[in-house]
Amino acid sequence: MRYVLVVSGFAVIAAVTWYLLRETAPAGVLSYQNSKVVSRGHALYDEFCASCHGQDLEGEPNWRQMDEDGYLPAPPHDASGHTWHHPDEQLVRITSYGSEAIIGGGYKSRMPGFADQMSREDIVAVLSFIKSTWPQSIIERHNSINLSAADG
């Protein structure tokens, strides 16, 4: 009987610890709290992304309205955009292979894939930089999206 109580106690402690870590630890693969990764990501963003998405992550004007060729302009990556609505792994895939390849179904996008120009580590660094610029409330919402994606 004593053995059962000890084992049960350890199981409860393990479950509570798992739950608390899950609720407080940053979710996903982005290292937005690592200044070294964020700094490298900022440099890569300036090199590969800023020409379309803006130096200050502001995106192109009228980014929600298709242009005359049926393309949506580059969206912002700041808190006003929709980047944070997607879990980390989906953001990595979009950045790696381009929007058209990931979304499919005839979706038109000028967003190319960067897998031939950047490693996965580089892409994660860029996305980490982007996430590091969001307000804490958006970071927390994005972490929840990552947790939901991990549970699904």
Image: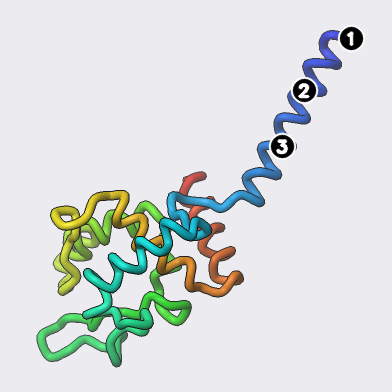
Secondary structure beneath label 3: helix
Residue 65, relative to residue 37: is it above or below? below
Q: Position of residue 63 (x, y in %)?
A: 29, 86
Q: Which mark is residue 10?
A: 2
**What residue sits right under mark 3 in the picture?**
17
Name the secondary structure under disc 2: helix
Q: In this image, 93 relative to 128: left or right?
A: left
Secondary element at tag 1: helix
Amino acid on which the number 2 mark rests in the picture? Phe
Q: Which residue is mark 1?
A: 2
Q: Residue furthest right?
A: 2
Q: Where does the image place residue 108, in percent across and percent down from the top left?
A: 15, 72
Q: CA distance from mark 2 to mark 3?
A: 10 Å
The earlier-in-sequence mark between 2 and 3 is 2
User: Split into 4 quadrants, where in the image is the N terminus?
Assistant: top right
Query: Do the residues under discs 2 and 3 have CB atoms within 8 angstroms?
Result: no
Classify 10 Å Cα crowding around label 3: few (below 14), some (14-19), many (20 and above): few
Amino acid type, label 1: Arg
For label 2, the crowd category at 10 Å Cα-Cα, with few meaning under 14, some 14 to 19 and many 20 or more, is few
Along the horizontal axis of the image, is 147 left or right of 76? Answer: right
Q: Amino acid at mark 3?
A: Thr
- Percent of width and height locating residue 97: 19, 57
